[in-house]
């Protein structure tokens, strides 16, 4: 019997590494449906997506995905554990029985690790990054060796989420073939590079980046606009300096008095500063780069604690695109699904459950020029998706 | 015995009409001191000043003023009655016994009018602009003819404030010689034009505007940057679309549910829209252009009701500049003054009473590049101010 493969992805942008992953899935489970839980316009590490969610969803569908769902902003701009739980729950809700993900060590038995460290997430509520360090030490002690590569750690977080949900999915870690996640160089002769390397090198020289992605992605990048934090940075800076401490204190994730440091430094630092330089000035031992970048998204989008709580209480599904097979799967799960399913956003939806995604889209639209939500229909892919090589 | 002449001004920028006013004061009261209560970086009609408060204060001192005090943001971005009361109280506090102001009808007996309409400001608390219309009808009925020209109306507001304070000042309305306040054209051969006409024409052709202002102002305009609402508009638009209704509801002056209209229209209107076009789309019968523009400043600077209340409870003096005579007057009033006097802003002040002015300065600085408050000393004018022609 054919099943449903789930993948949690950012596709920032969709490149040959992602294509390779989809090809591996299809080789192994040719009859399975592939569902993607994809971040929207703001990503897990606290940054805007380089292309909007519609372009990235289309790229995935053109390259073999059957159904692309948005991982809502509140679920996605989160530390690894929460991000993973949001993604795995979503895939579980649409019936996924397998979870594919890239890992630096595909030989790891992630579910076993998850059972070993299940009780280590005791301090889940406070998720400051120094917690990450303590957590890492505890992992090393419990498992017997460190699990500290970015994708391995995410894999462990997926496994923990899967465990928490009663193990609805079987995990398929896929050995990452590309160079390190942090490697920002392209390596001529190869056809796979990290998304960061692709973004960076595309900006420097478009043709140099071409071999590392499908033509559709390259076309989207050429068309642009390609967005980065520096586009949004003047708005964030303005938001901080024009806010009162009591406003900042209401922002989700504003803890331990970091608001005083944020306000004071942002008022004093030179106007020529870039976003990256700003984060490096503001960060502390407890508020690392990524933690601050996520906090920056929460400030930029005015995300409040109660909005996160409401999402956790009642998550939802938002369709970005599908092909015929994806549509059939949707029809199948619809009647028993206890999450609301949004295919178009109405004027009422934007005031209610979709308010944060809508705000995120509105802010994104300031630079990309395209309405992101209201009345936009999911992308229906009717073409022939790329054949397996 | 020599006295103190007070003038409430915006100097946006300081031009020959303002110079003419100072010359008239000096002709009539050659030994009097001239004190200016000048708006800071955001003005009464809800707009950013074209040049910062320091340039404008310097212009005034170079042209005959002895002492320039800032009319704080909370006192100045207000409807006419509150604006006038803030300015007249401030001048009263520094010992002014005369108030000079331009009027379309200098023959009006403003103090008598004030006594006649004193009880007409019953609805003071609600100051929506449709109130202005009812108020105007009541004035016409009581006084026997309309008082509806912009400067006449402001004069009446000054007179009412003076009355409320026990008439510490004698009023000297000065016939406006320039063309109408709303006239945006320059008239070759004349040397006086409205500030709006000067700003508009300077942008079109710098030399054409030169004859209408002192050389010091012209130099400042040339140096720039000249700021307008359209500079701040992207920030305001971002602020609105990224805010929740509950945030907007906390902004000073947000009444009658206008926040819903503001949010909805700002989300929907095209990104190509200018500030002016936006106001024209959003305005209603009750929320006129100027009312909305002031509300826009409150949103931009995140001004809350409790901040306005705190200012009304305890106003303050902020020195922008003085000459030797001005300094002597300051020394004289200092010991009996029950308002705090700020000459430099410390890191503590900016968190307390001066917080709103500091925020206003920080937002202004984003476009003008100059720190507006912290550690800036008042401008001490030691040169020879312009001789009376």
Image: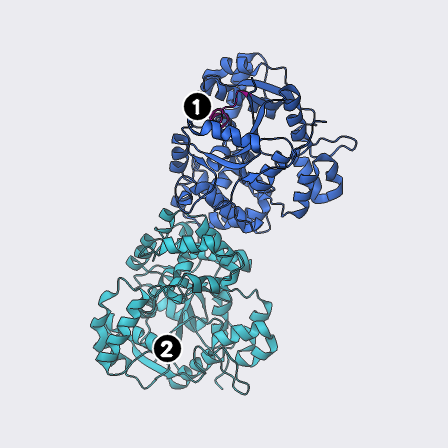
Chain colours: A blue, B cyan
Instruction: Indicate whether A13 appears above or below A364.
Output: above
- Disc 1 vs disc 2: Cβ atoms closer than 8 Å? no
Residue B186's x, y, as percent? 52, 81
Residue B183 is left or right of residue A207, and the answer is left
Front residue (pair A237, A109): A109
Instruction: Indicate whether B271 appears above or below A349.
Output: below
**How far apart are the alpha carbons under marks 1 and 2?**
65 Å
* Residue that carries the numbered disc 1 in the rendered image: A123
Residue A236 visible to an observer of this rendering: no
Residue B253's x, y, as percent? 34, 58
Q: State the count of labels.
A: 2
The numbered disc on residue B151 is 2
Taking the spot 47% from the left edge, 69% from the top edge, the residue there is: B57
Residue A140's x, y, as percent? 56, 15
Q: Which residues are magenta?
A: A88-98
Residue B175 is left or right of residue A132, and the answer is left
Residue B40 is left or right of residue A173, and the answer is left
Taking the spot 46% from the left edge, 45% from the top edge, the residue there is: A359
Does the magenta portion include A90? yes
Residue B301's x, y, as percent? 43, 55
- Quadrant position of residue A149: top right
Secondary element type, mark 1: helix
Front residue (pair B222, A121): A121
Other residues around mark 1 within 10 Å, as few (<14) / some (14–19) / many (≥20): few
């Amino acid at each position: 019997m054919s099943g449903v493969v789930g993948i949690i992805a950012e596709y920032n942008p969709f490149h040959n590494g992602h294509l390779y992953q989809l090809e591996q899935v299809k080789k192994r489970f040719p009859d399975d449906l592939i569902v993607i839980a994809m971040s929207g316009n703001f990503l897990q590490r606290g940054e805007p997506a380089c292309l909007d969610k519609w372009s990235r969803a289309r790229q995935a569908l053109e390259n073999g995905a059957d159904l692309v769902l948005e991982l809502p902003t509140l679920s996605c701009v989160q530390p690894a554990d929460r991000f993973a739980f949001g993604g795995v729950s979503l895939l579980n809700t649409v019936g996924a029985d397998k979870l594919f993900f890239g890992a630096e060590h595909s030989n790891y038995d992630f579910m076993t690790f998850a059972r070993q460290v299940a009780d280590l997430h005791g301090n889940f509520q406070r998720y400051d990054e120094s917690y990450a360090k303590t957590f890492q030490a505890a992992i090393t002690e419990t498992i017997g060796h460190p699990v500290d590569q970015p994708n391995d750690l995410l894999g462990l977080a997926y496994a923990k989420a899967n465990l928490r949900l009663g193990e609805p999915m079987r995990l398929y870690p896929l050995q990452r073939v590309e160079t390190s996640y942090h490697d920002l160089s392209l390596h001529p002769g190869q056809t796979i590079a990290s998304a960061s390397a692709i973004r960076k090198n595309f900006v420097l020289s478009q043709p140099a980046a071409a071999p590392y992605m499908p033509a559709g992605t390259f076309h989207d990048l050429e068309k642009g606009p390609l967005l980065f934090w520096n586009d949004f940075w003047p708005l964030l800076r303005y938001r901080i300096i024009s806010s009162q401490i009591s406003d900042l204190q209401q922002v989700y994730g504003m803890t331990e008095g970091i608001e005083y440091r944020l306000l004071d430094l942002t008022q004093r630092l030179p106007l020529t500063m870039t976003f990256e330089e700003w984060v490096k000035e503001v960060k502390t031992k407890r508020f690392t780069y990524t933690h601050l970048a996520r906090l920056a998204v929460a400030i930029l989008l005015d995300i409040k604690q109660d909005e996160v709580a409401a999402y956790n209480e009642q998550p939802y599904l938002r369709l970005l695109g599908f092909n015929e097979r994806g549509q059939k799967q949707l029809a199948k799960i619809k009647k028993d699904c206890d999450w609301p399913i949004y295919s178009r956003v109405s004027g009422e939806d934007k005031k209610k459950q979709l308010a944060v995604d809508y705000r995120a889209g509105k802010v994104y639209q300031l630079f990309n020029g395209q309405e992101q939500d209201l009345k936009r229909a999911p992308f229906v892919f009717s073409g022939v998706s790329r054949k397996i090589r």
